[in-house]
Every structure is written in structure tokens, then in C-alpha cells.
Image (cartoon, rainbow, N blue to C red):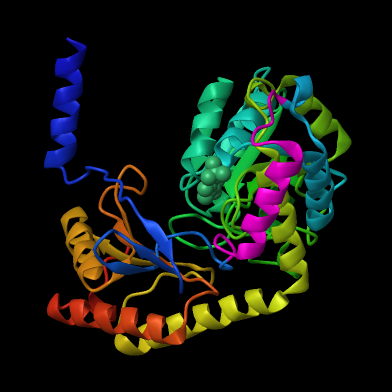
Amino acid sequence: MWRNLLAQRLDQQHRQCLWRQRKVLSPLSGHRLGDGRDSLCDFAGNDYLGLAHDRRLSEAQAEGARCYGAGGGASHLVSGHLEPHHRLETALAELTGRPRALLFSTGYMANLGTLQLLGAGGAQIFQDRLNHASLLDGARLSEARSRRYHHRDHNDLERLLARSASDFSRLVVSDGVFSMDGDVADIASLAATCQRHNACLMIDDAHGIGVLGEQGSGCVGRRFDSEQVPVLVGTLGKALGSAGAFVAGDELLIDALTQFARPYIYTTAQPPGVACASLRALEILEQEPERRAQLQDNIAYWRDNAKTLGIPLMTSTTPIQPVMLGDTQRVILWSDMLREHGFLVGAIREPTVPKGQARLRITISAAHERRQIDALLETLHGLAKKAGLSRDTQVLP
Ligand SMILES: *Cc1c(COP(=O)(O)O)cnc(C)c1O
């Protein structure tokens, strides 16, 4: 019975062009990946500062493993909370200008744990429609009543808040940088709306940490204090090139997460070497601001030249530069053709993005060379010309 059901679902997945496939890759120099046959230039990953394959991080990780062991050995509350974890929490609190930070094994778990905590006791959760899947799943886990407002539409949010009962706590949740669109939430406006309605604001800045703001502190970072944005989530596996995540906020929030967040309590601490790699990444972030400057240069270069060539852009100033194609089959076709030309880009389809908004998710890194960017632009230009796609015919929502 269950086999039939699964087989049916898999079959449907195939027929709708939604089949997801892993590629076995090995990193090469120059922001490239080998697939056993070809060398592909990586325009798909989230390694925005080129730190994931930096020798200094892998050496810090190896040294951490030698000193503290390959694994944490237990959860943080039992005996797995080791010295590098603790130092990393202090450094993350400092980076984000918050009193404290709590380390989680992944961003997915940080969001599950935080929403499970804050959604308890009859709370209501209000989320941007385009929030990351882990935030949607966290709201489900919390059993809170959950509403979604139109993307970046604060009038819609305002309307939902005004209509909701205020005798329970209310939590507004948004991505900082939207992971599939690359646009940035208007934090000042969200904070003001939340203050007007006495709601708590939670921002998931997975793609902003290391990239945006003063010293890479993110789109919230030191610009908004923990009165304005009481709950800040960041991840370490994207711009910072290692793995893990954190929640930053005041003493009360961190104490409550430590006591009650099940995805924090019931899991083994992340390997201490990984925390050492993250610490090294934070040092490099501070000492080498030129990486962030190079990233911004590359993004501007990409946008300027794409515009000139008539490649349709979205309104993103971040490293996430999607090319919206709309149709699922076209996205698959284009990403296959790009691969033939030696480029790896994300082919993003439903349910990750809404139906009819399939897109190539192209990401820019400080590690890209100009000639690599030029080559991808040329190839895309060729594809767009063949498909009769131009700025004027772009398929936008
Ligand atoms: C990647 C991502 C996460 C999950 O982080 P992981 O550490 O990869 O589990 C959470 N939120 C957003 C917005 C993300 O883009």
C-alpha cells in the first residue's frame, strides 16, 4: 500500500518536471566544481565571500578537531557545550550588537526552535508569504495560529494585525534577504508596525550576515537594537562558509530558548571544529573588508552588464540575482544548457517558489573573476536571444 502511494507521488513528480536531483561534485580552484567530467563555474551556491574553501577555515576546523575531538559527544545541556562553542556565541553577540547569542546546529533548527518557543500559549504568527520553508515549518511545529501577508506588503500586515485579537502574544516573522528573490525586507517599517501593534519582530538574516551592514553584521545587525528587532536569526553556512546558526537577542530570550526550545535541547552539539572554522571566518570578515567590497563590485558589474544585454533582472541588490523564466520546463532546459556551457546555477521550481515563477537562481560571489561573470552573461544573452526573451517580454509576477 505505502509503496504504491510513494510510487504514484514519485511518478507525478517526474511528470511535472519537479524531480529533484543531486549532483556529486568536488570543489576545484577558482570557484569551480568538478562533476567527474567537466569543470563547472559555481553560480549556484551561497558562498558569497569565497570562504567555504579557504584554507584558513579548514585548518582552523582541523586544529579544532585535534584539540576538542571530532564530535561534541552530547547535547549542549549535557556535556557537549565546549569552549569554542562558547567563544563563538560571544563573538556572534558582538557582531550583531546583541546582549547574547545561542548557537544551533543548523538554521533550519534555529527557526524551528525559536518559533516553537514563541508560538506557544495561543500566540499568533504573521509571516511574509515568501519566507523560507524553515520558518513556515517552525510555525507549524508551534501549533500557533499562522497567517501570511503579501510579500513586503506592510499594509496587508497592518490589516491582519489590526483585525487580530491582542490578548495573546503576536509574532511577526520575515526573512531579512529573501532567499529566492534577493530583495531585502524593510526592517525599519516592520519594526515600526510591530511597535504600533505591540507585536514581537523576528528576522531571519541567513543571507544578510557577512554581506550587508556595518562590518557584515547583516541587514539588522547594529542598525536596529533588540527593542526594535528582539529576535534575530543568522546562519554560518552561507557567507561565512562554515555551518551552523544562531539566535541573537536579550538575556530573557536566550534563557527561554535554552530551557524550552526542543530543537536546541534534544540534539548533539555541532562538532567543535566547525565552531572553530566559524570563529576563523568571523576574524577574516573583520580583517578583510575588501571581500565585501569585491562582492558589491561584482554584483554591480553583473547588474550593469545584464541590463545592457537585455537579460531580465529582478529588483535585488544582494548576491542573489534570479532570472525569472516562469515556466518550469524552460528553467530545466536553460539550466541544462548552462551546464553544457560550464556553469552551475540553481533551477528553482515550485514548491520552493510559487507556481509559474520558476527561475534560475544565480548567485554572485566575491570569488568570481570578471571573465567568469562575462562568460555567463554572454551565454545567457545567447539563450535569451534564441528564446526571444528581452527586458520587454520578461515574465514577472
Ligand atoms: C538557508 C536558510 C536557512 C537554513 O539554514 P541552514 O543552516 O542551511 O539550515 C534558514 N533561513 C533562510 C532564509 C535560509 O536561506
Q: What stretch is highlighted in magenta?
A: 51-75
Kindly identify the residue that appears in the image at 11 percent across and 40 percent down.
15
Q: Residue at x 17, y 82 (%)?
A: 385
Q: Is residue 348 above or below residue 37?
A: above
The image quadrant where one finds the N terminus is: top left
* Image x and y of residue 330, in percent: 18, 61
Instruction: Where is residue 175? Give x, y as percent.
Output: 57, 50
**Residue 346, can we see it?**
yes
The quarter of the displayed image where residue 360 is located: bottom left
Residue 376: image x %, image y %?
32, 78
Is residue 209 visible in the rendered image? The answer is: no
Q: Which of 268 and 139 is in front in this view?
A: 268
- Residue 380 in the image: above or below residue 136: below
Q: Quadrant of residue 295?
A: bottom right
The quarter of the picture where residue 216 lies is bottom right
The x, y position of residue 156, in whole percent, is 53, 47
Left or right: where 53 falls relative to 32: right
In the displayed structure image, the side of residue 311 where residue 44 appears, left or right: right
Q: Quadrant of the C terminus?
A: bottom left
Residue 63 colored in magenta in the image: yes
Pick the front one: 59 or 182 = 59
Q: Is residue 182 above or below residue 22?
A: below
How many numbered markers are drawn?
A: 0
**Nearer to me, 155 or 329:** 329
Q: Is residue 33 left or right of residue 335?
A: right
The reply to whether the magenta stretch includes residue 316 is no
